[in-house]
Image: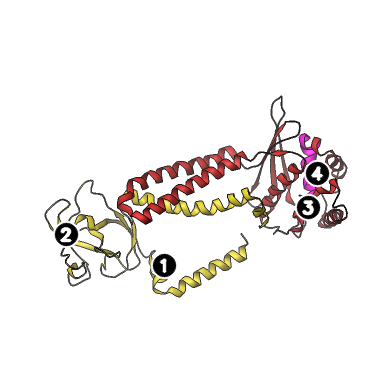
Chain colours: A red, B yellow
Amino acid sequence: MASQEKITVHNIADLKNTSDDAIPNYLNSLKFRQDNSLLDTRLALGYGAFAVAATCFLWDYKLGFEDTKYYTAAAVALYSVLNGLLTFWIGSVEKGTVYQGVAADGSKISIATSTKKLVPTYHVKVTTTPKKGSPQTIELARSFTEWFDSQGHFIARPFQTMLATTVPLIAQADPMRAAAGAVARSEELVNAGSDVLDAILAADATGADAGGAGKKSKRRKA
Amino acid sequence: MLSSLQNPRQAAAQLLNFALILSTAFMMWKGFSVAANSPSPIVVVLSGSMEPAFQRGDLLFLWNRNFLAETDVGEVVVYNVRDKDIPIVHRVVRKFGTGDKAQLLTKGDNNLADDTELYAKGQDYLERKDIIGSVVGYIPFVGYVTIMLSEHPWLKTAMLGIMGLLVVLQRE
């Protein structure tokens, strides 16, 4: 369970990365089929560029500068192009997308997240595209304190509830969270102090130990 | 921190960031090289033989193309002595003939004698191909770090130690 790992609560990158990692865990457990093509393209471009640089280094090392300078010039040009494409891909295509997937009913979902410097708020942009119909975008901005306790434990339940109650497509896949969220969300959890979150964490931990074989307990693991 | 390593794609993406920093630095260097047509377009002055023009530790920018004029008397050039890979920064003081086969003699501004002593055995002058660039710009003193590191090897150990400590403390 990821919630057993502690992070530094003052580190916004840590908060964001831990939350980002929890999204695929949660959605994949709900039978969403993850589509990794964005990341795969980024890896292909990046490692392609690196391979060009490595090859250039090798021939420079073996043969010296004079004999290889035209190849080196070509390699520099190719490297700039690949790096430019990579920058374009990260900045204009991925735009912070951390998850893309297909739900059981064929609807597509794409989730992009971002944070602003020094502000502990998680900005989530969810775009769902039904099989027939136009895409719908839901944007939310929540404080990280809703699912991290003061010690820096990630607590899956409020995090998953946040997604399930705001995104209809996730609510369909996880009606239990969506319903539970409707009750809990009313007031307490949103304004909950660290002691309440600790209590939820304890309950989740014991629940997982006791019902390790149960299907439902699996869902809480994120 | 370590949890991301469980996902091979995430691990590959993190490794990529590191790899791209290295390769971008290398390709920028190569880009300068190709533009200046010099195997080493930036050098650090290692001796005081060109004082007062250049001090030890000055960073020099080289240009190795003759678009407008041939390398001529008065230019400060960097050359490699045949079969030795130590770049030397000195001024051209004599030139006989023109073109690629012109015979060039160099001398350090602060040296009493010219460079015939420094050249390889049987080499009495330089040709254009021995020169890896003429100095076109410089930044004073910033190259001194590399001199310190090569003259006091324990500094390398100390620097690695400090960097390692930072990595441990930052947990990045």
Compute the Cα span from label 2 to label 3: 75 Å
Choose top left, top right, bottom left or bottom right for residue A41.
Answer: top right
- Residue bearing mark 1: B145
Locate residue A116, reporting x and y percent. Answer: 64, 48
Q: Residue at x 86, y 45 (%)?
A: A184
Q: Which mark is drawn over residue A161?
A: 4
Q: Is residue A179 visible?
A: yes
Q: Nearer the viewer, residue A60 or B156?
A: A60
* Camera-nearest label, 3 or 1: 3
* Camera-nearest label, 2 or 1: 2
Q: Chain of mark 1?
A: B
Compute the Cα span from label 3 to label 4: 11 Å
Choose top left, top right, bottom left or bottom right for residue B59.
Answer: bottom left
Compute the Cα span from label 4 to label 1: 55 Å
Q: Based on the picture, tell me whether residue A204 belongs to the magenta stretch.
A: no
Choose top left, top right, bottom left or bottom right for residue A176.
Answer: top right
- Residue bearing mark 3: A155
- Residue bearing mark 2: B104
Q: Chain of mark 2?
A: B
Compute the Cα span from label 3 to label 1: 48 Å
- Determine whether, in the image, residue B134 is placed left or right of residue B124: right
- Determine whether, in the image, residue A76 is placed left or right of residue B93: right
Compute the Cα span from label 4 to label 2: 79 Å
